[in-house]
Image (cartoon, grey):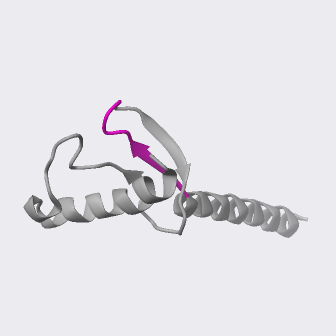
Amino acid sequence: MKAIIINNKINFFLMIFSILLLLKFWIGIFSHDEFKGHHLFIKHRPIWKTYFYSPRGMSDLKLSEMSKEKKHEQTLFNEFIIRNQNL
């Protein structure tokens, strides 16, 4: 009887973990660069990153003028938010 209870608990935690992992890959949050609000969205492809923001913001900064990290952030923002969310 104890083995069945332990097995049910393990299955329950595995199910919860699987659901959370799926949500992590497919649900994202982005910060709107003009209105400073946070919005949930469904990603068009699975990626570990959850929070997206635009380092450029409302400025006229070009990708060539950004650091490597900011270029990467802006590229992901453009792919997931601008091109796929009709923002």
The residue at the point 85 percent across, 64 percent down is 2
Q: Which residues are magenta?
A: 27-35
**68 left or right of 15 in image:** left
Q: Quadrant of residue 70?
A: bottom left
Residue 16, given in percent of the width and then of the height, sits at 68, 58
Is 63 within the magenta?
A: no
55 above or below 75?
Answer: above
**57 left or right of 65 in image:** right
The residue at the point 48 percent across, 40 percent down is 39
Regarding residue 31, the answer to whether it shows in the image is: yes
Residue 73, given in percent of the width and then of the height, sits at 27, 59
**4 left or right of 61 in image:** right
Q: Could you say which is closer to the camera, residue 37 or residue 4?
A: 37
The residue at the point 57 percent across, 61 percent down is 26
Furthest residue in direction left, as rendered = 65
**75 left or right of 21 in image:** left
Residue 71, given in percent of the width and then of the height, sits at 20, 63
Q: Could you say which is closer to the camera, residue 48 or residue 2?
A: 48
Q: Could you say which is closer to the camera, residue 10 or residue 38?
A: 38
Point out the image quarter for the N terminus.
bottom right
Regarding residue 50, the answer to whether it shows in the image is: no
Residue 55, given in percent of the width and then of the height, sits at 22, 49
- Tell how many labels: 0
